[in-house]
Amino acid sequence: MAKRTPIVEITSYGTYSHWDASSKELPKITQFTNTVTAEEGVEFGFIVNIKKAKGSLLNYCIYHPGIINKKGVVLAPFDGEIYVRSNDWDFYLGDTVQLLHPVDGLESNLGEWRMELQMQGKTIAEKTFNVVGRDQAQFWKQRGY
């Protein structure tokens, strides 16, 4: 029997309402964007719809720009795995801008955040977000981005 090829589509990306990991509800999109203003608590990422892949193992990874924790140590990329729960499944991959190091402030959050989903060793979806300081965000917003 031939193996079905999964159908993967990024349905939204950008900033979202607060996400509760214990809830079955996905966060709601607030703005489609690849540029995120570094404000504490801002939720960003993407939602992907996966069809014809129930039971397949999905690997996810978030590469962040050297966030420093409370102990002053740079955090490793955040990764994990989850099984696709149905043949028409929506999955949210995202993160939140956080103030983890009191001296550094939000500075270690600035830069490129790459979020990636893989299935059977192949990248099936990825997005890169540029987290910028408030002044730089206003510059780009005035230009329509």
Image (cartoon, helix red, strand yellow):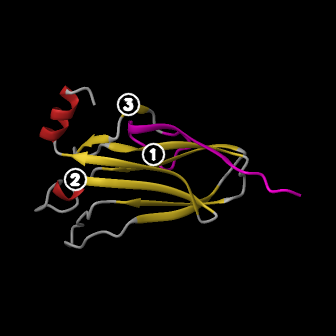
Three-letter code, disc 2: Leu
| Residue 119 location, quadrant | bottom right
User: Which mark, by number, is residue 30?
Assistant: 3
User: Which mark, by number, is residue 20?
Assistant: 1
The residue positioned 52% from the left and 44% from the top of the image is: 23
Q: Is residue 71 above or below residue 49?
A: below
Judged from this view, the residue extending furthest toward the right is: 1
Q: Is residue 34 above or below residue 59?
A: above
For the residues labelled 2 and 3, the Cα–Cα distance comes to 20 Å
User: Which mark, by number, is residue 121?
Assistant: none
Q: Which residue is mark 2?
A: 110
| Residue 59 location, quadrant | bottom right
Three-letter code, disc 3: Thr
Q: Give the mark nearer the N terminus: 3 vs 1.
A: 1
Q: Is residue 13 magenta?
A: yes
User: Disc 3 on helix, strand or loop?
Assistant: strand
For the residues labelled 1 and 2, the Cα–Cα distance comes to 24 Å
Report the quarter where the C terminus lies: top left
